[in-house]
Image: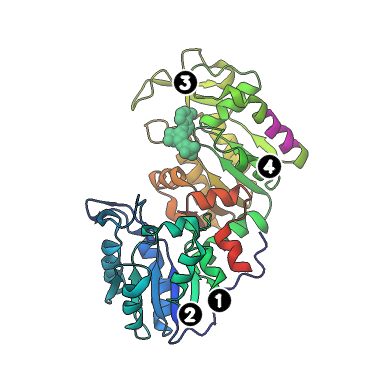
Amino acid sequence: MNLDNLKTTDGIDVAGKRVLYRADLNVPAKDGVITDATRLERVAPGLQALAARGAKVIVISHFGRPKSGPDKENSLGLVAAALGGLLQRHVSLAGDCIGLHAHAIVDALKPGDVCVLENTRFHKGEETNDPAFAEALAELGDIFVNDAFSAAHRAHASTEGLTHHLPSYAGPLMMEEINALKAALEVPKRPTVAVVGGAKVSTKIPILTNLVGKVDKLIIGGGMANTFLQAQGIDVGRSLAEPEFHDMARDIMTMAKAHGCDVILPSDAVIAREFKPGAACEVVGVENVPTDAMILDIGPASIASMGAHLRQCRTLLWNGPMGAFEISPFGEGTFTLARDAANQTREGTLLSIAGGGDTVAALNAAGVAGEFTYVSTAGGAFLEWLEGKDLPGISALTR
Ligand code: AMP
């Protein structure tokens, strides 16, 4: 993806203009209560800054997965109220994101005001990227700012469609994420290392295939390492593994070799016979896993060796845990490596970027999420970037 033509909101004149601002307001909520407001907290400064520059800010977003048309459960009402609290100003909510009601709310805005339009997914045209729906949305703005990196892997009307109708810009959060990923993958300080773990190799093939051509070292851990070990003829007992992906694992090793990428697999493992908290466990070399046991974490020799490789590197990209970190004591591999990376980041010798659902949870459990250079909460969009794919919501901003 060529990002040279990406336009940002820096320096553009927004005073008195209607800024259609695509945020990701899709926060987790249960029984009418927002359970994690991180996304709102992150979006608030960008909104505040546009309002302070005299823009009329019109926030649009999806929320949840409404099945057919509007429903109370997926209304952005709750979120608009919370956003008002964070911004310490009144944030009005339009009961629909297009049509008369939306126009009435937008027409009443004064420079510096903020409103939220109801869930874009209440209209089928959002996910089908219907040009007529995008046009109806576009009528409400003079310019379009997309600040939802986490929705950029989807070509929807509120991400891609709008760029066909309005002058379009990348917002500050979007730029933060893009710059972090560029620093890790496009113009990194070398040597670079990717730590890839998680349950299954089958879900990470595109990531591994892309990364072996880009990074100097690839550390593989978690359940997916078992398939690589098995593909080398090692018996991993009852461990999670995908024998049908042996050929793929061998292909990835061959590709890595061709690109000069050093692949580091676990040499020892923490094994147990039960997958439950406090299960009796022991450390064995990966060649000595008993047939009735499961590998549930990398062992101390692997941690030491992987840590040493990490210390040789200047840039780290991390996705996926090294073991079943949610279940004690199988989090040690993930936590120790995460702490190593956090220490190096603090010392200024490592740029550390991490992302993908369970990775954020694992870094939080290790208590170091705040110490990485950048932790992406974008999920699918982060993973697709790692896969080397074009994200339609971003490439549309470069047209
Ligand atoms: P993913 O969503 O693919 O990143 O996988 C994350 C999940 O992989 C976590 O829930 C971990 O508990 C699980 N996991 C990591 N290592 C292992 C392992 N050796 N055996 C079983 N599950 C694992």
Which residue is label 2 attached to? Answer: 142
Residue 343 seen: no
Q: Looking at the image, do the residues carrying marks 2 and 1 touch, with CB atoms under 8 Å apart?
A: yes
- Of discs 3 and 1, which sits in the foreground? 1
Name above or below for residue 50 compared with residue 374: below
Mark 3 residue crowding within 10 angstroms, few (<14) / some (14–19) / many (20+): many
Q: Which amino acid type is shown beneath numbered disc 3?
A: Met
Which residue is label 1 attached to? Answer: 167
Residue 189 appears left or right of 48:
right
Mark 2 residue crowding within 10 angstroms, few (<14) / some (14–19) / many (20+): some
Residue 214 seen: yes
Q: Which amino acid type is shown beneath numbered disc 1?
A: Pro
Residue 367, percent from left and from top: 39, 48
Whole-number angstrom distance, CA of label 4 to CA of label 1: 37 Å
Point out the tag, 4 or 1, that comes first from the N-terminus.
1
Q: Which amino acid type is shown beneath numbered disc 2?
A: Asp
Q: What mark, if any, has residue 294 been given in the picture?
A: 3
Name which residue lies at 37% across and 68% down: 97
Does label 4 point to a residue whose CB lies under 8 Å from ligand 1? Answer: no
The range drawn in magenta is 250-257
Main SS, magenta region, reads: helix
Residue 123 appears left or right of 30:
right
Name which residue lies at 67% across and 26% down: 247
Which residue is label 4 attached to? Answer: 212
**Element on which disc 4 rests:** helix
Q: Is residue 316 magenta?
A: no
**Which residue is more in the foreground, 304 or 109?**
109
